[in-house]
Image (cartoon, rainbow, N blue to C red):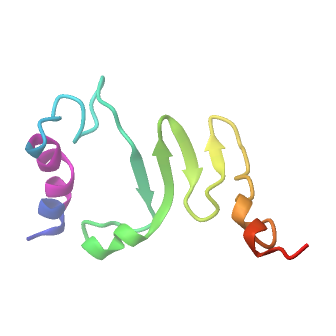
Amino acid sequence: MTPMQALRCATIFGAEAIGFQKDLGSLEVGKLADVLVLEKNLLENIQYTNSIQYFMKNGLMYDANSLDQILPVEKKLAKPYWLEGEPAMMRTN
């Protein structure tokens, strides 16, 4: 299977398989789309899918490394609550 065939299986053919081809699977006006921006051309090597630089979800663009929102406005990712120190159940006081 070529990288293009693999990409089509994961996008348009996948949407067709679950009956959502009218809403998903390709970039077209009126369709829903979450988008990945890759640093490398996955058509050269399908394993380049791990080279994500940016992603768009629900109309917001994020930096893939920091998960900071970068468009339409810049917004730093809040520190996850589980990194705020010792978990409450482990505290002895």
Between 29 and 57, the one lying in front of the other is 57
Q: Residue at x 62, y 34 (%)?
A: 72
Locate residue 84, reporting x and y percent: 80, 65
Task: Reply yes or no: does residue 39 show up in magenta.
Answer: no
Q: Residue at x 22, y 42 (%)?
A: 25
Image side of residue 9 versus residue 76, left or right: left
Q: Residue at x 30, y 25 (%)?
A: 29
Image side of residue 4 versus residue 72, left or right: left
Q: Is residue 47 above or below residue 25?
A: below
Locate residue 60, reporting x and y percent: 55, 39
Quarter of the figure with residue 41: bottom left
Question: Can you name the residue that lies furthest to the front here?
Answer: 93
Q: Is residue 14 above or below residue 7?
A: above
Task: Reply yes or no: does residue 15 show up in magenta.
Answer: yes
Q: Residue at x 74, y 69 (%)?
A: 89
Locate residue 32, reporting x and y percent: 33, 32
**Mark count:** 0
Magenta span: predominant SS is helix
Q: Is residue 11 above or below residue 92?
A: above
User: Which contiguous range is marked in magenta?
Assistant: 7-16
Between 87 and 38, the one lying in front of the other is 87
Quarter of the figure with residue 93: bottom right
**Quadrant housing the N terminus:** bottom left
Locate residue 30, reporting x and y percent: 30, 23
